[in-house]
Image (cartoon, grey):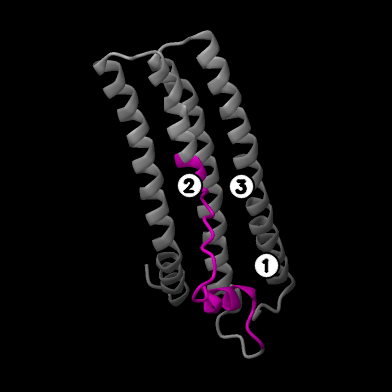
Amino acid sequence: MTSTTPRDQQEYTALRATVRERGTARVWIFVVGIIGWAALTIATAAVVPTPVATLVPLLALAAVFEGVYALHIGAERIGRYLHVFHEEGDTGSPGWEHVVAAFGRPRGAPRLDALFTVPFLLAAAFNLVPALIVQPTIQELVFVAGAHVLFAIRLFAARADAARQRNADQHRFADLKRGVT
């Protein structure tokens, strides 16, 4: 880390703590959110057995995903800030953010999904089951399935955006450091 002032050290320490806390919060929001979604799905299916009622748990599922996504994006952005403003130009050994960026994903290593895309997709598919059990009309099916498809599209769009974000943020912070606005 090139920072030498106490203020720089405080900023670095606070931002690394923020990244850690957001990473932990992201996982807990996912776990608690999925449990809440499952309970809501069961309750909704038992109390209001109509196809359109499946939109209530879908909305909860979407809210949980947006929370996970926001925490992930924020933590990644802080990481890029640390990379550019606290580690670039370091004459000693590279810092955490440089090592992580250089490490990447080795060939053959498992791909981690920080956004939990597959579990969210499975939950959305399971969310449709109560709507299908009550024999919906074509209009209900199109409406309810359409909402679920829109959620799936949102998942894939967010995943693609997150994949591009690291590089874009890295370049933007580098421009800001050079005074380019």
Pointer 2 residue: 118
> Please, what is the three-letter code of the amino acid marked with disc 2?
Val
Residue found 56% across the figure and 20% down from its top: 42
Name the mark nearer the viewer: 3 or 2: 2
- Horizontally, residue 121 falls left or right of residue 109, namely left
Which numbered tag is attached to residue 26?
3
Pointer 1 residue: 12
- Horizontally, residue 2 falls left or right of residue 81, namely right
The mark that comes first in sequence, 1 or 3, is: 1
Asked if residue 62 can be seen in this view, the reply is no
Q: What stretch is highlighted in magenta?
A: 93-121
Horizontal and vertical percent position of residue 59? 46, 27
Is residue 39 shown above or below 137? below
Q: In which quarter of the image is residue 16?
A: bottom right
> Please, what is the three-letter code of the amino acid marked with disc 3?
Arg
147 or 2: which is nearer to us?
147
Q: Residues within 10 Å of mark 3 (few under 14, many from 20)?
A: many
Q: Residues within 10 Å of mark 2 (few under 14, many from 20)?
A: few
Q: How far is disc 1 from disc 2 in space, using C-alphas?
A: 34 Å
Contact, mark 1 vs mark 3 (Cβ under 8 Å): no
The mark that comes first in sequence, 3 or 2, is: 3
Q: Is mark 3 on a helix, strand or loop?
A: helix
Asked if residue 174 can be seen in this view, the reply is yes
Q: How crowded is mark 1: few (under 14 residues within 10 Å), some or many (20 or more)?
A: many
Horizontal and vertical percent position of residue 181? 37, 67
Task: Count the labels in the image.
Answer: 3
- Horizontally, residue 6 falls left or right of residue 67, namely right
169 or 130: which is nearer to us?
130
Q: What element carries label 1?
A: helix
Is residue 52 shown above or below 95? above
Q: How far is disc 3 from disc 2 in space, using C-alphas?
A: 16 Å
